[in-house]
Amino acid sequence: MAKSSKKLTPRLRKLSVYLYIPNIIGYARVLLNCYAFGICFSNKWHFSVLYFISFVCDAIDGWCARKFNQVSTFGAVLDMVTDRISTASLLAILSQVYRPGLVFVSLLALDIGSHWLQMYSTFLTGKTSHKDVKDSTNWLFKAYYGNRIFMGYCCVACEVLYLILFLIVDTQSESLVDVVGSSLQQGSLLSILVALSLFGWAIKQVVNVIQMKTAADVCVHYDIEKKQKP
């Protein structure tokens, strides 16, 4: 009996990580997004609300992880994968309803590429979090990951802008420049929201480029040091 209980212990420990509160929230986010994207064309507003709720849950699960001391590598990866797939799916949809669609495909590639490189470089350097950029020499990169409010604004602005673009498009293959220009010229609450979102979105794209270059440099330095070792 004692032997069987000892054998079960590692399984129970593994199961307990899967059942961490922030990880359960992560599973809920995945299900919510699956349903949301399933109805995105039949009910734009319903989709947008569900998508944004899932996005907000990203902050909630992080708070829960710290509050209940349930921070885990699995949770961090689940979080990032969910974020990247959600944003990538929305960008893929936007690439089909706006022209030139290549703009959104490029943004998709930049988002996934920069975050994947950042995660990989994090493991190479032995860091526990991809947000640990204290040794970076770039002030914007450090400010982005070092200030939760600033990073939160940029992330929210980015997602809100994409949702607005999805909501205001009337027909397929509309000009992106014309739609954004028209929204900014309205002088309404929408134009203010678009302007604020554009600013935060632009900062996030610059950070993504910096992140990709910084992470690529880490990988290159690792290769050089590895070859120099006897």
Image (spheres, rainbow, N blue to C red):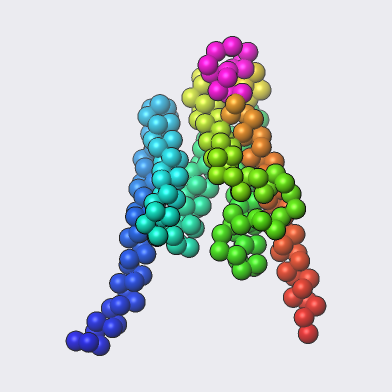
Q: In this view, does 156 lie above or below 22?
A: above
Residue 182 image point, x, y percent: 61, 15
Q: Is residue 185 magenta?
A: yes
The residue located at (69%, 52%) in the rendering is 212
Q: Closest to the observer: 79 or 172?
A: 79
In magenta segment, residue 63: no
- The quadrant of the picture occupied by the C terminus is bottom right
Q: Is residue 80 visible?
A: yes
In the image, residue 55 sits, relative to residue 166, either above or below, namely below
Name the residue furthest left.
Answer: 1
Judged left or right of residue 20, residue 2 is left
Q: In this view, does 47 lie to the left or right of 218?
A: left
Query: Who's the residue at 55% across and 44% down the image?
Result: 148
Locate residue 17: give its quadrant.
bottom left
Q: What residue is at 59 percent from the left and 39 percent from the top?
A: 150
In the image: residue 29, left or right of residue 154: left
- Looking at the rendering, in which quadrant would you find the N terminus? bottom left
User: What residue range appears in magenta?
Assistant: 182-195
Residue 111 image point, x, y percent? 61, 46
Q: Is residue 34 visible?
A: no
Res 48 quadrant in image: top left
> Magenta part mainly helix, strand or loop?
helix
Residue at image coords 64%, 51%: 114
Measuring from the top left, give residue 46's x and y in whole percent: 37, 29
Could you say where residue 191 lies in the image, as x and y percent from the top left?
A: 58, 18
**Count of numbered labels shown in the rendering:** 0
